[in-house]
Image (tube, grey):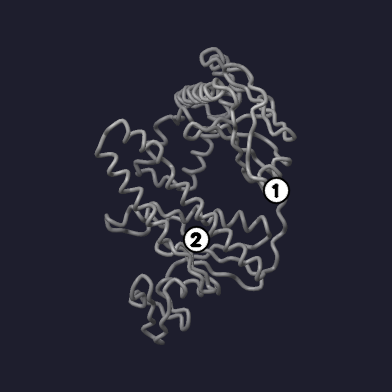
Amino acid sequence: MKIAVRVKLLPASVYEPDALAATLRSCNRAATWVSETAHAKGLFRRNALQQAVYYEVKDTFDLAAQPAVRVIKKVVDAYATLKANIKAGNLGSQEVKRRQRAETKPIVFREDAAQPYDDRILTWNLDQRTVSIWTVTGRLKGIPFVGSERALELLASRSGESDLMMREGMFFLIATIDVSEPPAYEPDGFLGVDLGIVNIATTSDGRIMSGRRVSRYRRHHRDVRKKLRTKRTKFAKRRLKRLRGREARYTTQRNHIIAKKLVHTAERTSRGIGLEDLSGIRQRVTARKVQRSRLHSWAFAQLGAFVEYKARRVGVPVVFVDPRNTSRQCSECRHTHRTNRVSQARFACRSCGAVLHADHGGTSLLERS
């Protein structure tokens, strides 16, 4: 399986960050222009598009041969991803405005969006922990990089492209790593996991991983953003820019921690993991206006993806179960009724009288499915 490893670049001189930033701007401006051309002429295959725009990209945006090829490939991959999302129904039906905008307008690339590099324009020196990288001002050699010890170990098996990314004035390289994937073992039962907003994850063992900290963090950032937007000063705008993405990074970190705990528990007890398949939950569930923000910021898909790839790395089998009626069905007698769910946390069966935590009852059903 393939995983991504991120390391941070430490440009030594003053002009190197400017050169890297200028490279990202040129490449993404070129990608936007290529995207407009591809959309207007209907050229979405790499060979046909490259034949039409290659020389103009090099001359107009001052790119060398290989970076120009990478830019064109980047555009082709973006349209292939868009086509796959439309085919999978991720953008809704043809009547949905989001899908109509995606189909009728060319893809636009942010000027600070990541740019792929291959081994011809990016050279890694793992012994000295430096890289040599192409920029629009010339090749920069000997730029140091730092990362976790685990990341530096994995770089030895790096293969394929690496992406140059800029975030808040800092530069990172994201490398693709091939990791051996052990075969999944035969599980001795399953660890049921119920996903939610109030409780991010509840296991069939009775362990509850509360979402209180995440909700409090989101509420704090929402209030700060609202306060800064009303001021409309230069300082407020700078502060908003610094805060951008911080909430998402915090949520990602929490999901990594929770996924690691779930996989470790299943591996230690030789069980598999039973997760709810919540695909399309936002379209199926209606929420009041005050609850929509919480519903749409619920990162259940990210948590599920983290659990799946971490489980694959250690051979833990993962199954996705239809969550229909798991919050209404009694885990003791299987009686199903909407009034069984008394409140968010309390479940009381109207048939057999069983009383238990609502999320824990759902995990018991997932464990048996």
Residue behind mark 2: 277
Between 317 and 222, the residue placed more toward the observer is: 222
Q: Quadrant of the C terminus?
A: bottom right
Nearest the camera: 131 or 188? Answer: 131
Q: Nearer the viewer, residue 212 or 181?
A: 212
Residue type at mark 1: give it: Val
Q: Residue at x 49, y 47 (%)?
A: 88
Q: Residue at x 60, y 23 (%)?
A: 67
Q: Quadrant of residue 73?
A: top right
Q: Is residue 224 above or below residue 204?
A: above
Q: Callout 1: helix, strand or loop?
A: loop
Amino acid at dot 2: Asp
Relative depth, front residue between 1 and 203: 203
Q: Position of residue 217 (x, y in %)?
A: 39, 53
Q: CA distance from mark 2 to mark 1?
A: 26 Å
- Disc 2 on helix, strand or loop? loop
Q: Position of residue 203 (x, y in %)?
A: 52, 69
Q: Residues within 10 Å of mark 2 (few under 14, many from 20)?
A: some
Residue 320's quadrant in the figure? bottom right
Per the image, the residue denoted by label 1 is 179
The structure residue drawn at horizontal position 44% and vertical position 44%, both measured from the top left corner, is 246
